[in-house]
Image (spheres, rainbow, N blue to C red):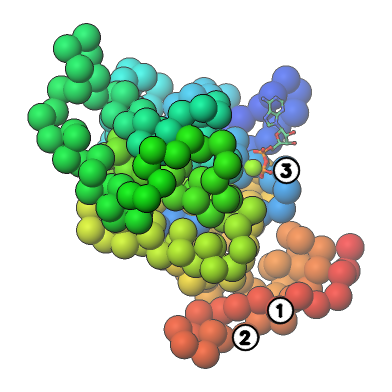
Amino acid sequence: MIQVDVEEVSKAFGAREVLRGVRFRVKPGEWFGILGPNGSGKSTLLHLITGLEPATAGNVRLDGKPVASCSRKALARQIAVLEQDALPPLGFTVQEVIEMGRYPYQNWLGDETADAAALVERIIAWLKLDSLRERTIDHLSGGERQRVALGKAMAQEPKLLLLDEPTTFLDIGYQVEMMDMVREWQQEWGMTVISVLHDLNLAAQYCDRLLLLHEGATAGIGTAEEVLRADLLEQVYGTRPHILAHPDSGVPQILLGKGTR
Ligand code: ADP
Ligand code: MG
């Protein structure tokens, strides 16, 4: 588990400022959700947290250490990223793809940890991929592909998992399956999760806290009750939703209303 501090972070591409003074702390073991309209800077913010993109101003710290001062390999041992449809090129088998997650732990002698093979077996069993392990990833369904991508991320044994719209192309059954798997994994292994989610209702059900971005700046931060408010969402998305409490969990859920843009 890791603590993530985003400290007054700004990011510009040329003259275009896409993140402006964003700050928040994600506590170890928390599931933090990033919401906002298309183009509001969500993916850019994830890239800054991975250290792949440098911030124009401000700092990202992992357990107090600036990401800018961490080596690639050290970061790869701490952070796994699951982006939409981010599997390797076609032709690899399911098992090979999951084994690729071990890359940060490999040197010229092979994997540095003795129980890597056992770990891969555990992951395949847990994700119910046993019957698919020899299949190439070419013809898997969207839901199966996302499970393989999750398996590869798990093989990395991250302390921090970053998800960028992991459920976008999935039907509702696979959406819930994906989120449940992440939650179960998080609770069992004790991991911090930061996810960009398109679906406000899923975010409210799974995330401990939410950040709402609007044109690169913080429009709201807090629990689902604090962030998913009709006035705030109307301001950010240009449509005023109706908000109900979920009959099982009581968390706010959105019904689309009229456009007000
Ligand atoms: P989101 O994930 O919220 O949809 P992004 O973070 O992908 O938004 O993008 C935010 C803005 O930054 C967009 O206007 C996008 O065009 C711009 N942007 C993202 N990456 C780059 C880049 N590498 N170069 C120039 N502009 C970029
Ligand atoms: Mg994005």
Q: Position of residue 259 (x, y in %)?
A: 87, 69
Is ligand 1 less than 8 Å from the beta carbon at label 3? Answer: yes
| Mark 2–mark 1 CB contact (< 8 Å) | yes
> Which badge, 2 or 1, is on the more N-terminal residue?
2
Residue shown at 55% from the left, 29% from the top: 90
- In the picture, measured across the screen, residue 151 lies left or right of residue 143, that is left
Of helix, strand and loop, which one carries label 2? strand
Tell me the crowding category of disc 2: few under 14, some 14 to 19, or many 20 or more residues within 10 angstroms, Cα based: few
Q: Visible in this render: residue 213?
A: yes
Q: Can the viewer see residue 47? A: no
Q: Residue at x 76, y 61 (%)?
A: 237
Residue with the most extreme top position:
108
Query: Nearer the N terminus, badge 3 or badge 2?
Result: 3
- Determine which residue is flagged by label 1: 255
Q: Mark 3 sits on what residue?
A: 39
The amino acid beneath tag 3 is Gly
Q: Position of residue 94 (x, y in %)?
A: 41, 38
Q: Write down which quadrant ligand 2 falls in.
A: top right
Q: Is residue 237 above or below residue 228?
A: above
User: Residue reaching furthest bottom?
Assistant: 247
Classify mark 1: helix, strand or loop.
strand
The kind of residue on which mark 1 rests is: Leu
- Image position of 223 with respect to 211: above or below: below
In the image, residue 120 lies at what x, y percent? Answer: 25, 40
- For disc 2, the marked residue is 244
Residue type highlighted by circle 2: Leu
Please say if 204 is above or below 152: below
